[in-house]
Image (tube, coloured by chain):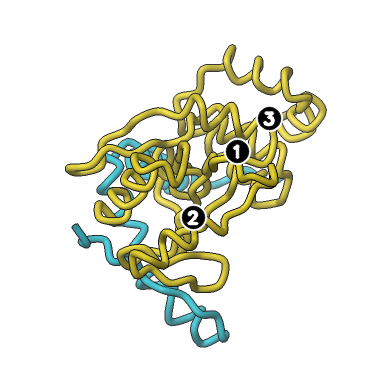
Chain colours: A yellow, B cyan
């Protein structure tokens, strides 16, 4: 795992990525009990291409040069399938900007804040996201005023009310 | 609704307490548990035709 996180950090230092942070089930595991998952979800802000389009092509090419191959939707980096998710809306961009640095063994990585993870689950809206919201509310230390501000700012009040009342 | 028998309610409380204890473990220790969960689940998923890869936690 450390080797995978080191590769991500190097990609950021070299400008292949502008910024990355762990999201998904492993970010939830940071705050809650461990969850079974086989993918490491990594949210990324990518450099803008000449065409102005968001594309993972440059990132995948850089990884291929390092010997890391694609496997389904993921790239296997040092034995771990990593799914890269480009920041796709304002909430995810904000979550990436405000993600926290966290040590993992000898390397430093970045994990989305629990409040943003919860808001992204609300926005995504699948049954497993609803379960994630419940788990984060039960087990994570959530800054409620910050969470409610994020929920309001990104227009998630209706789902928050539906899922928590 | 039927009430839970006290000994069953105590079991549920203990399970909940265990979840909260697990949530407080250090992050690397929790990821190591995720890998152990993968080892348990992977054979079942492979039997159902899913391709899954158990993580190499110790790659440095």
Q: Is residue B47 above or below residue B16?
A: below
Q: Mark 2 packing: few (<14 Cα in 10 Å), some, or many (20+)?
A: some
Dot 1 falls on which chain?
A
Q: Is residue B25 visible?
A: yes
Left or right: residue A161 versus residue A44 is: right
Reading the chain from its start, which is encountered first: label 3 or label 1? 3
Reading the chain from its start, which is encountered first: label 3 or label 2? 2
What residue did someone put label 1 on? A134
Disc number for residue B4? none
Q: CA distance from mark 3 to mark 2?
A: 22 Å
Quadrant of the rendered image containing residue A115: top right
Left or right: residue A154 versus residue A105 is: right
Q: At 51% from the left edge and 58% from the top edge, which residue is drawn?
A: A83
Q: Nearer the viewer, mark 3 or mark 1?
A: 3
Q: Do the residues at discs 2 and 1 belong to one chain?
A: yes
What residue did someone put label 2 on? A59
What residue did someone put label 3 on? A90
Quadrant the C terminus of chain A occupies: top right
Dot 2 falls on which chain?
A
Q: Mark 3 packing: few (<14 Cα in 10 Å), some, or many (20+)?
A: few
Percent of width and height locating residue B54: 36, 71
């Amino acid at each position: 795992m450390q080797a995978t996180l080191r590769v991500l950090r190097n990609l950021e230092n070299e400008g292949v990525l502008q910024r990355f942070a762990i999201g998904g089930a492993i970010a939830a595991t940071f705050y809650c009990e461990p969850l079974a998952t086989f993918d490491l979800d990594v949210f990324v802000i990518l450099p803008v291409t000449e065409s102005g389009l968001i594309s993972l092509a440059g990132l995948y090419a850089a990884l291929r040069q390092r010997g890391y191959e694609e496997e389904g939707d993921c790239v296997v980096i040092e034995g771990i399938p990593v799914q890269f998710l480009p920041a796709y809306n304002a909430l995810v961009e904000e979550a990436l900007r405000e993600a926290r640095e966290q040590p993992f063994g000898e390397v430093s990585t970045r994990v989305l804040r629990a409040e943003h993870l919860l808001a992204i689950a609300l926005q995504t809206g699948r049954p497993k996201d609803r379960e994630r919201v419940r788990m984060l509310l039960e087990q994570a230390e959530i800054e409620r005023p910050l969470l409610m501000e994020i929920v309001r700012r990104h227009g998630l009040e209706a789902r928050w009310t539906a899922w928590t009342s | 609704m039927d009430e839970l028998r006290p000994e069953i309610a105590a079991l549920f409380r203990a399970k909940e307490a265990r979840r909260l204890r697990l949530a407080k473990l250090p992050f690397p220790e929790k990821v190591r548990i995720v890998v152990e969960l993968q080892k348990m689940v992977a054979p079942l998923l492979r039997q159902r035709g899913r391709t899954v890869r158990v993580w190499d936690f110790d790659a440095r």
